[in-house]
């Protein structure tokens, strides 16, 4: 606990994380709305309209839906990571490398708020030396 970001810096990080969370939930909402409309449309197809549907179009739709589901899942993972980052701010462990106890550079924490290792330690870990 020798090194830690100042309260001012932590407040800045918190703001940026909360902003990111806002963006993610907006994205997920938009996707959810899209999925809702798509399934409503499918629920309302009558036998007649099934014959008029082009199979190619139907294929594109389901592919599109799959992609959206994936995006939604990725969105919630990302969201979880942002929540963890906020918890770390509360705990006072935010931005501190858990390997070497050094401060993780500000730019990195802005990009990857849930990072727990500095780049050096991460690279060492990759090589199997960490
Ligand atoms: Zn480190």
Image (cartoon, grey):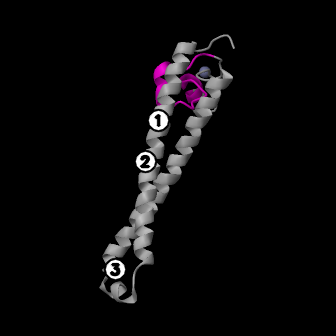
**Residue span colored magenta:** 102-123
For the residues labelled 3 and 2, say whether their Cβ atoms are less than 8 Å apart.
no
Q: Which of 107 and 49 is in front in this view?
A: 49
- Picture coordinates of residue 62, whole percent (x, y): 41, 69
Cα–Cα span, label 1 and label 2: 11 Å
Residue indicated by mark 2: 27
Cα–Cα span, label 3 and label 1: 39 Å
Identify the secondary structure beneath mark 3: helix
Quarter assignment of residue 4? top right
- Picture coordinates of residue 76, whole percent (x, y): 54, 47
What residue is shown at x 61% (from left), y 28% (from top)? Answer: 116
Residue 79 is one of the magenta-drawn residues? no
Residue indicated by mark 1: 20
The response on whether ligand 1 sits within 8 Å of label 3 is: no
Identify the secondary structure beneath mark 1: helix
* Looking at the image, residue 109 lies above or below residue 23: above
Quarter assignment of residue 81? top right
Q: Nearer the viewer, residue 58 or 48?
A: 48
Mark 1 or mark 2, earlier in chain: 1
Q: Which of marks 3 and 1 is in front?
A: 1
Residue indicated by mark 3: 55
Label number found at residue 125: none
What residue is shown at x 59% (from left), y 31% (from top)? Answer: 85
Which quarter holds ligand 1? top right
- Picture coordinates of residue 100, whole percent (x, y): 65, 19
* Looking at the image, residue 65 lies above or below residue 98: below
Mark 3 or mark 1, earlier in chain: 1
- Residue 127 visible within the image: no
Mark 3 or mark 2, earlier in chain: 2
**Quadrant of the drawing holding the N terminus:** top right
Q: How crowded is mark 1: few (under 14 residues within 10 Å), some or many (20 or more)?
A: some
Query: Residue 41 vs residue 7: left or right?
Result: left
């Amino acid at each position: 606990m020798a090194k830690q970001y100042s309260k001012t810096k932590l407040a800045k990080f918190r703001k940026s994380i909360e902003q990111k969370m806002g963006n993610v939930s907006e994205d997920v909402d938009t996707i959810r709305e899209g999925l809702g409309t798509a399934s409503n449309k499918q629920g309302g197809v009558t036998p007649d309209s099934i014959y008029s549907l082009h199979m190619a179009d139907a294929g594109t739709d389901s592919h599109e839906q799959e992609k959206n589901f994936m995006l939604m899942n990725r969105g919630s993972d990302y969201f979880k990571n942002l929540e963890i980052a906020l918890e770390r701010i509360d705990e006072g462990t935010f931005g501190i490398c858990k390997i070497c106890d050094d401060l993780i550079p500000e730019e990195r924490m802005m990009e990857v708020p849930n990072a727990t290792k500095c780049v050096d330690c991460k690279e060492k870990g990759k090589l199997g030396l960490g």
